[in-house]
Image (cartoon, grey):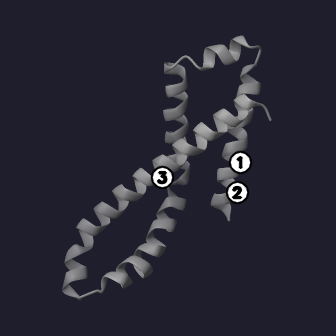
Amino acid sequence: MSLIDRYIIKKYLSTFLFTMAIFTVVMVVFDVSERLDDFLKYHAPLDKIIFEYYAGFIPFYLNFLCPLINFIAVIFFTSKMADQTEIVPILSAGYSFNRLLRPYMMAATLIFAISLV
């Protein structure tokens, strides 16, 4: 694995994790605003809400939305690489498009395996 592969995989996974964090915050904010009346009506304790409700809610919906989050992350970091003209030097160095896709496939396989488990 070359230095460029590690660089692309690092950018891919960091963008994926950042996108997952943003989706998590948005999901929790919308869910809290929707269910706040129920939480207050039934006097639900905060530790039960966090450790029982949201401990199952967040992983379920993140796994459910993982393909969409993955697609958005790839679009974000690839467009940023193209905007900063990082792809042109990689291709000028003799890498083919198929070779450029190898780190994408490695990172996507890792995300798939984690999501599958």
Q: Are marks 2 and 1 in contact (CB under 8 Å)?
A: yes
Kindly identify the amino acid type of the residue bearing the numbered disc 2: Ala
Please name the residue that numbered disc 1 is placed on.
Answer: 109
Q: Which one is in front, 45 or 30?
A: 45
Residue at 23% over, 80% down:
38
Disc 1 on helix, strand or loop? helix
Residue at 63% over, 59% down:
115
- Disc 2 versus disc 3: distance between alpha carbons? 16 Å
Position of residue 94 relative to residue 105, above or below, is above
Residue at 52% over, 40% down:
73
Kindly identify the amino acid type of the residue bearing the numbered disc 3: Met
The crowd level at tag 1 (other Cα within 10 Å; few <14, some 14-19, many 20+) is few
The crowd level at tag 3 (other Cα within 10 Å; few <14, some 14-19, many 20+) is many
- Disc 1 versus disc 3: distance between alpha carbons? 17 Å
Sequence order check, earlier mark of 2 and 3: 3
Sequence order check, earlier mark of 1 and 3: 3
Kindly identify the amino acid type of the residue bearing the numbered disc 1: Thr
Position of residue 105 relative to residue 101, above or below, is below
> How many badges with numbers are in the image?
3
Please name the residue that numbered disc 2 is placed on.
Answer: 113
Q: Position of residue 20 (x, y in %)?
A: 48, 52
